[in-house]
Structures are given as structure tokens and as C-alpha cells.
Image: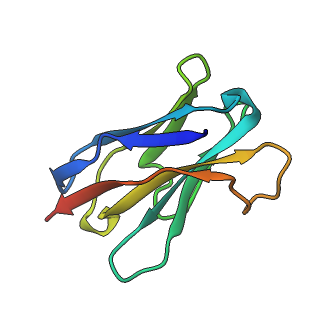
Amino acid sequence: QVQLVESGGGLVHTGDSLRLSCAASGLTFSNYVMGWFRQAPGKEREFVGRIRRSGNTYYADSVQGRFTISRDNVKNTVYLQMNSLKPEDTAVYFCAARFWSKPINEYDYWGQGTQVTVSS
């Protein structure tokens, strides 16, 4: 079965950096657009960014210039490099996979999430 497993979360301070990883298995990774989402306590899940098969990336305005998504199609892993972290970045971060031809909001698979906490 398909599994997406996030790792790398933790407790950091304002201005610190953190890199999240999402290891995928059970799917042909190179056929999927990979996305990152986050959900803060009491808030709805929000889009963070995505990376296409080609490596093309797109980010939410709130993280543009601070976060970078990359992928390794040999290791079947997608990364989220987060720099200049702010307390408002505190959330559970999820990775998701969307088959390349599906509509942009229809992700097929989701990970279990990893907690990121940024203290001020």
C-alpha cells in the first residue's frame, strides 16, 4: 500500500531553520506532484507549496522566499526546507501526493504529519 512518512519536525526558535522529509513508498513517485500542507491548532489545513515532476515549485505567499521544496526521485523523497521560521509557522505539517493528471486540489495520498513548533 502507499505510505507517506514525514520526519524532521521539532521545537525550534524564531529565526531557526528546519528541514522536513517525506519518504514515499508503494507508488511510482515520479508520476506524482508532491505537496506540503500544514494545520495549526484551531485552524483549517492550508497549502504550503508543491513540486511538480519537473521540479517546478509553487508556494503560498506566507512562506514564499523562506521555504524551499525539493525532491529526489531516486530516493522517493520530498523535502521542505524551512528558513527564518516564525511562531506563526507552528503547525502539523503534512506531505501529500497527487497523480500528475489530476486536478490541483485532488491529492490522492497523505502522510500522518509531523509537528513543528516555533517558540518566540
Question: Residue at the location (36% across, 72% down)?
Answer: 40
Q: Compared to 22, does 35 lie above or below?
A: below
With 65 as the anchor, is 2 left or right in this view?
right
- Asked whether residue 81 appears in the rendered view, the answer is no
Whether residue 83 appears in this view of the structure is yes
Apparent side of residue 104 relative to residue 78 in the rendered image (left or right): right
The location of residue 42, given as percent across then percent down, is 36, 83
Q: Relative to residue 16, is residue 74 depicted above or below?
A: above
The quarter of the picture where the C terminus appears is: bottom left
* Quadrant placement of the N terminus: top right
Instruction: Check the image and report above or below for 31 versus 73.
Output: below
Of 13 and 84, the residue lying toward us: 13
Q: How many marks?
A: 0
Q: Where is residue 99 in the image (x, y as percent from the top left)?
A: 76, 44
Residue 89: image location, x then y, percent: 33, 63
Residue lying furthest bottom: 42
Q: Nearer the viewer, residue 46 or 84?
A: 46
Residue at the image point whose x is 27% and y is 61% from the top: 86
Quadrant of the rendered structure where residue 116 is?
A: bottom left
Q: How is the model colour-coded?
A: rainbow
Q: In this view, does 83 lie to the left or right of 87?
A: right
